[in-house]
Image (spheres, grey):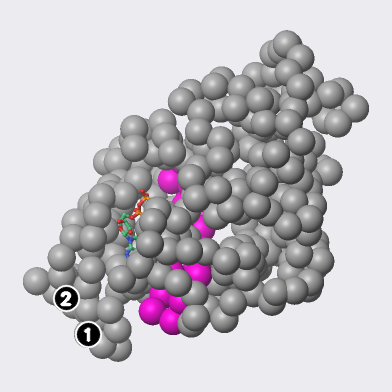
Amino acid sequence: KKVADRYLKREVLGEGTYGVVYKAIDTKTGQTVAIKKIRLGKQKEGVNFTALREIKLLKELKDPNIIELIDAFPHKGNLHLVFEFMETDLEAVIRDRNIVLSLADIKSYLQMTLKGLAFCHKKWVLHRDMKPNNLLIGSRGQLKLADFGLARIFGSPDRRFTHQVFARWYRAPELLFGAKQYGPGVDVWAAACIFAELLLRRPFLQGNSDIDQLGKIFGAFGTPKHSQWPDMVFLPDYVEYQYVPGQPIRTLFPMASDDALDLLSKMFMYDPKARISTQQALEHRFFSSGPPPTEPALLPRPP
Ligand code: ADP
């Protein structure tokens, strides 16, 4: 009944990318936690050591906008990761038709997302799998990024489990062109997709294959010109494409303010070297001009 002599298992919360997640009580602190059970391949003993070492580093990543990794231990051939328990996630907020999101609310959610990202990027840790259901929301409305660094430790999850295809909608163009070396820009692109989704209340670029995803991106912003992204031609999966004109960003987001559109277009820069950083994005006038971001405790949430 007790796992690792400390955690009392409760109900299953869901099936995730890496395995089952269940609710539990930490008998040491009385705190409710979420335990993620990660299946480890038998023949991957060496990988496990690397994983455990990297997970030790994740335990040091403490920030108000990052889900705390409380504990990590192997148990019956599975790796167990213990996280603080969170009430809901941003996907549930976006999908709830009874919730109205004001510009101040969107600003608040985006700011918390960027703060969590900026903290990790400063330490050279990438998320790599940003999507609205990885942005968890606590009882006091605080947004925290979940699954930080897991994509790197356990490998790109999208190939192993089909439900992961949704992550494609948040994938940066350099990844779709097969870049092996990429940087924090991949998380900024994903954050831009989430920003767009908060404005539109539906996923912005819904590709149904990697090629189609690029097509959706080109359809919105136009095919990248050589001058916009000189290094593109060196990417492994780069192929010549037909010219497609872009749409003015105003028509894509008719309801957004000028400041919102300016920030959004800087986060959606094709060239990852030209894309705005998380730190610069936080300093953008979208956040300093009125209305101020809503206090987390006052943000609208599903019942
Ligand atoms: P995915 O890999 O598809 O993103 P996860 O493995 O993160 O899914 O989570 C699977 C399920 O567990 C989801 O329903 C998610 O809401 C829930 N869950 C994950 N982490 C937590 C947490 N810290 N607190 C509460 N629920 C969680």
223 or 231: which is nearer to us?
223
184 or 79: which is nearer to us?
184
Residue 32 image point, x, y percent = 28, 79
Residue 147 on the magenta segment = yes
Q: Is residue 127 visible?
A: no
Dot 2 beta carbon under 8 Å from ligand 1: no
Residue 183 image point, x, y percent = 70, 46
Task: Using the image, determine if residue 14 lies above or below residue 17.
Answer: below
Residue 66 on the magenta segment = no
Q: In the rendered image, which quarter is residue 225 located in?
A: top right
Q: Determine which of the numbered discs, if any, sits on residue 8 in the image.
A: 2
Question: Which residue of the protein is positioned furthest toward the left in this rendering?
Answer: 1
Query: Which residue is at 49% across, 80% downward?
Result: 298
Q: Determine which of the numbered discs, if any, sits on residue 174 in the image.
A: none
164 or 82: which is nearer to us?
164
Dot 1 beta carbon under 8 Å from ligand 1: no
52 or 39: which is nearer to us?
39
Q: Quadrant of the N terminus?
A: bottom left
The magenta span reads 136-155
Q: Is residue 127 left or right of residue 141?
A: right
Q: Determine which of the numbered discs, if any, sits on residue 27 in the image.
A: 1
Residue 50 image point, x, y percent = 47, 51
Task: Using the image, determine if residue 110 lies above or below residue 298.
Answer: above
- Label 2 sits on a secondary structure element that is strand
